[in-house]
């Protein structure tokens, strides 16, 4: 992200149960958030079958790329059945190029 190649990163886990390696990434990103190089948005959502847990999504975006968070939330919260086209959109929002999405979908097509 700091090289300007990828516009967004997303982490998803149970709040308070993140693995150490993920917490390490958050600490590394936090230094850059503090000085305005990247932006952070945290979305906590109650889990219906586990009210004592929160699903946490943490998004990091380059300045000017915050729109990607709302687009990603729209995609992952309102998709119905997941399709190859949704998978491609997911990758594109993270900044993967068409050829990279092509390879991903060739290796891991969505099973419908």
Image (cartoon, helix red, strand yellow):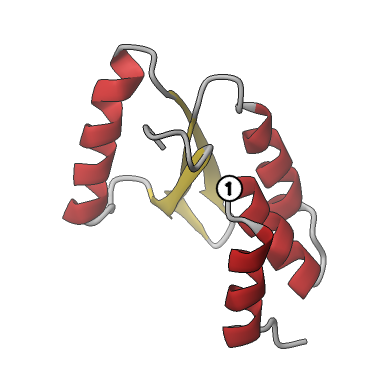
| Residue 105 shows in the view | yes
Callout 1: SS: loop
* Left or right of 99 in this view: 75: right
Q: Against 5, is 96 above or below?
A: below
Badge 1 crowding class, 10 Å Cα cut-off, few under 14, some 14 to 19, many 20 or more, is some
Residue 13 point in image, percent of width and height: 40, 54
Question: Residue 84: x percent and y percent?
Answer: 75, 73
Residue denoted by label 1: 95
Query: Left of 38 or right of it: where is 64?
Result: right
Q: Is residue 37 above or below residue 21?
A: above
Which is nearer the eye, 86 or 99?
A: 99
Which quarter of the rendered picture does the C terminus lie within? Answer: bottom right
Residue at 30%, 15% in the rendered image: 34
Question: Residue drawn 62% across and 56% down?
Answer: 97
Name, please, the residue furthest toward the top. 35
Q: Look at 67% across and 45% down and name the residue there.
A: 72
Q: Residue at x 79, y 60 (%)?
A: 79
Given residues 109 and 45, the one toward you in this image is 109
Question: Which percent across, then down, holds residue 83?
Answer: 78, 73
Image quadrant assignment for residue 3: top left
- 50 or 90: nearer the viewer: 90
Check the picture and name the quadrant holding the N terminus.
top left
């Amino acid at each position: 992200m700091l090289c300007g190649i990828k516009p967004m990163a997303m982490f998803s886990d149970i709040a308070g149960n993140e693995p150490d390696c993920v917490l390490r990434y958050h600490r590394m990103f936090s230094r850059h958030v503090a000085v305005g190089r990247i932006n952070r948005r945290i979305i906590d959502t109650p889990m219906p079958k586990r009210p004592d847990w929160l699903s946490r999504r943490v998004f990091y975006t380059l300045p000017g790329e915050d729109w990607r968070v709302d687009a990603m939330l729209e995609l992952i919260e309102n998709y119905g059945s997941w399709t190859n086209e949704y998978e491609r959109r997911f990758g594109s929002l993270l900044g993967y190029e068409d050829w990279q999405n092509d390879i991903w979908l060739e290796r891991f097509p969505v099973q419908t």
